[in-house]
Amino acid sequence: MAMRWILASAMMLVSGSYLYRNYQDRKEALAAAPQAAPAPAVVAEPAPMLDAKQLAALRAAVKSGDSNVRWAAMQSLFTFGDPAILPILEQAMGSETDSQIRIGIVLLLKTSGDAAALRILKMGVNDTDPVVRVASLRVIGEVADLAAAPLAAEAVNDNDDTVKLEAITALSRLQQRRKAQYEQLSEQLRQQYESQAKKAQESAG
């Protein structure tokens, strides 16, 4: 009986030792195996807030008889990123009778990087209301592309002194931006030249 117990115990020890070694071997193999990179997180584009019917209703509101409704609709379309917003603003700039809304349209363009905005700014510079002209020139000086310089230069001949002053200020700001861009480009070219010269020297050495 004792012999059987000893043999059974020995077999259990051998079996346990084998299982342990097998576990250790598998553990080391898994640790040595290359781990698959986690899949990159994909952020889905948010669904549009407005459907086509709601968007059409907002666009129609731009032609409302109430100036407050017209302006609110323009602001909402701009905020929602309506792809047709610039043509809508351009049309409104030519037909809007409320000069405050025309000023608002121009100021909206401060956050637009689209080149089509330049056409609207041009309409603003040629507006019958000097306040609209001043607002347009201010936007040109602050954010417009250097291509807007001729508009500001032309406005220097305006018959309103306030408009003239804003035109000169806009030209000065555009020139400062041009100078900053030139200096940035020069610095990039200098760094590129020095990097290439260093590589050529290392290769020769």
Image (tube, helix red, strand yellow):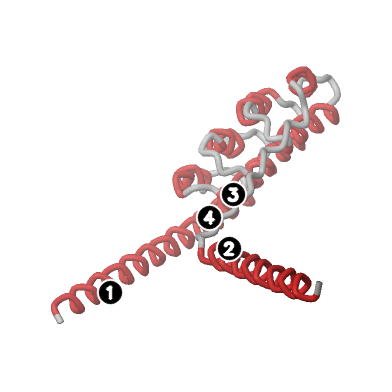
Which is more N-terminal, label 3 or label 2?
A: 2
Compute the Cα span from label 3 to label 1.
40 Å
**Label pair 4/3, CB-CB below 8 angstroms:** no
Q: Amino acid at mark 2?
A: Arg
The image quarter containing residue 46 is top right
Rendered image: mark on residue 174: none
Crowd class of label 1 (few under 14; some 14 to 19; many from 20; radius 10 Å): few
Residue 161, compared with residue 198, is above or below; it is: above
Residue 105's spot in the image, x, y percent? 69, 37
Q: Amino acid at mark 4?
A: Ile
Residue farthest along the bottom direction in this orientation = 205
Q: Amino acid at mark 1?
A: Glu
Which residue in the structure is indicated by mark 4? 168
Residue 204, compared with residue 159, is above or below; it is: below
Rendered image: mark on residue 194: 1
Tag nearer the camera, 2 or 3 = 2
Residue at the spot 58% in from the left edge and 63% down from the top edge: 26
Quadrant of the frame with the C terminus:
bottom left
Compute the Cα span from label 4 to label 1.
39 Å
Which residue in the structure is indicated by mark 3? 39
The image quarter containing residue 8 is bottom right
Residue 156's spot in the image, x, y percent? 51, 48
Tag nearer the camera, 3 or 1 = 3
Q: Amino acid at mark 3?
A: Ala
Between 175 and 24, the one lying in front of the other is 24
Residue at the spot 72% in from the left edge and 68% down from the top edge: 12
Quadrant of the frame with the N terminus:
bottom right
Between 101 and 85, the one lying in front of the other is 85
Q: Is residue 149 left or right of residue 130?
A: left
Crowd class of label 3 (few under 14; some 14 to 19; many from 20; radius 10 Å): few
Say which element carries label 4.
helix
